[in-house]
Image (cartoon, helix red, strand yellow):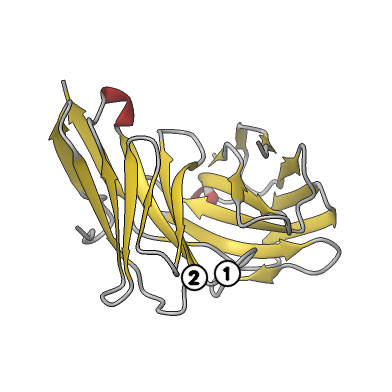
Amino acid sequence: GESVGLHLPTLSVQEGDNSIINCAYSNSASDYFIWYKQESGKGPQFIIDIRSNMDKRQGQRVTVLLNKTVKHLSLQIAATQPGDSAVYFCAESPGANSKLTFGKGITLSVRP
Amino acid sequence: GAVVSQHPSWVICKSGTSVKIECRSLDFQATTMFWYRQFPKQSLMLMATSNEGSKATYEQGVEKDKFLINHASLTLSTLTVTSAHPEDSSFYICSATSPLDYGYTFGSGTRLTVV
């Protein structure tokens, strides 16, 4: 979901369940998309990326889906663990070494 | 993998003073570096883009005379917050890219508190 105002929305999931975090991006010319995880007081940590010529990419426990038609990006986390609790941001870029624009972010909270 | 070192991790300064934040790429040459600012519970907002040896490009609304960016070498970029005020208190994060791949490597951030 998208945030309203200045507060990040929160997604609460049960440990062991799958999580789906969604992001709507704005620039149809964006060529490169990245998901980041940010823990409190730290810089963003790379999770997974995808180029615009793909619609799905899988990593270890994570999958990114790209729907260019509706400018939508999602991150799926399998078997969510307490260590996955953090703020997640999607980011888009028009190309290599170009500026990266961040989405609004979602807080993932994992219930034990 | 690529590592970006950002220093200091936190700093407290008095209103009216200047603070310099350093961002170093440790094992690659960073042709482009980006500086972001992040307020609590908000996203990262790009402040400026700097290319080695040239003037930084600032985003709309960011005062270039207040936030001085220097990218004098392929491994070092600095951000100086001049005449800091309490409203400049924020989390500042740098990011670097190299021409070899698509990756963006982020520093660990600097928490600036102006009192």
Looking at the image, is mark 1 or mark 2 earlier in the sequence? 2
Q: Quadrant of the N terminus of chain B?
A: top right
Marks 2 and 1: in contact by CB < 8 Å? yes
Tell me which corner region of the image, top left, top right, bottom left or bottom right, holds residue B46.
bottom right
Q: Nearer the viewer, residue B9 or B13?
A: B9
Q: Nearer the viewer, residue B64 or B84?
A: B64
Image position of B82 (left or right of A14) = right
Q: Position of residue B105 (x, y in %)?
A: 61, 46
Q: Nearer the viewer, residue B108 or B40?
A: B108
Q: Position of residue A67 (x, y in %)?
A: 29, 68
| Residue holding disc 2 | A31
Label 1 sits on a secondary structure element that is loop
- Kind of residue at disc 1: Gly
Residue B84 visible in this rendered orientation of the protein? no
| Residue holding disc 1 | A95
Instruction: Look at 25% across and 36% down and name the residue there.
Output: A78
Residue B9: assigned label = none
Label 2 sits on a secondary structure element that is loop
